[in-house]
Image (cartoon, helix red, strand yellow):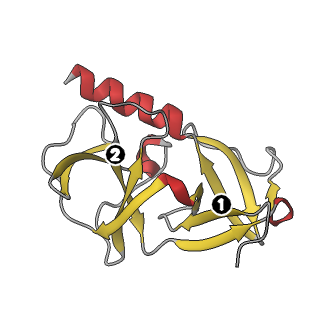
Amino acid sequence: MAHAGSLKSRLIPMQQKPLLLPASCIADVVDYSRPSGGSQENKWFLGEIDWRGQTVPLISFERINGGRFAEFSATARIAVMHSSTGNEQLPFYGMVIQGIPQELDLNAGDIQLVNETDSIAGSAETSRVTVRDIPAAIPDLEQLEQQLSALLTAA
């Protein structure tokens, strides 16, 4: 049961460090399906998938964050994300994840910022944290969505 002041969150399994997000960011988690399209110049844009009758762009967080990314694995899934910026041209987008997100009810004391000298945040992260002793990253969804929106507008 959630306590007053707790935040419903999801710990999203990734190939490198898991991502920590508010539960409200995630619209759905679906089985991985191979996207159509994609971009040779922007390898983080994997193409588009069909979700509930809509075409949704699919990204690799690891690639946009400057890390390595192996597209296919037995545990790959797609987290369909709500736009955090309210962009009407991009109401949803997909992100490849590795498995089922873990639900967490977090209180302020459950999250510690990681000292930047120990762990440099990637370009698409706002910070690195420890959540109940699990190292995680907080993604910069606004920047990520702006990059995706700019790419789709240019296409």
Quadrant of residue 39 in the image?
top left
Observer-nearest of 136 and 100: 100
The answer to whether residue 87 is left or right of residue 10 is left
Left or right of 56 in this view: 141:
right
Indicate the position of residue 110 as horizontal and vertical percent values: 81, 66
**Residue at which label 1 appears:** 136
Q: Which mark is residue 25?
A: none
Give the percent coordinates (x, y) of residue 23.
55, 60
Q: The residue under label 2 is which amino acid type?
A: Phe
Q: Is residue 47 visible?
A: no
Q: Is residue 124 visible?
A: yes
Secondary structure at badge 2 equals strand
Left or right relative to 148: residue 105: right
* Residue that extends furthest to the right in the rendered view of this protein: 109
For label 1, the SS is strand
Q: Nearer the viewer, residue 140 or 24?
A: 24
- The answer to whether residue 118 is above or below residue 86 is below
Residue at 35% x, 61% y is 70
Looking at marks 2 and 1 on the same chain, the residue that comes earlier in the sequence is marked by 2
Task: Give the answer, above or below, for where 14 lies relative to 85.
Answer: below
Residue 148: horizontal and vertical position, in percent?
Answer: 36, 33
According to the picture, the residue beneath numbered tag 2 turns out to be 92
Q: CA distance from mark 2 to mark 1?
A: 23 Å
Q: Position of residue 43 (x, y in %)?
A: 30, 41
Q: Residue at x 83, y 59 (%)?
A: 108
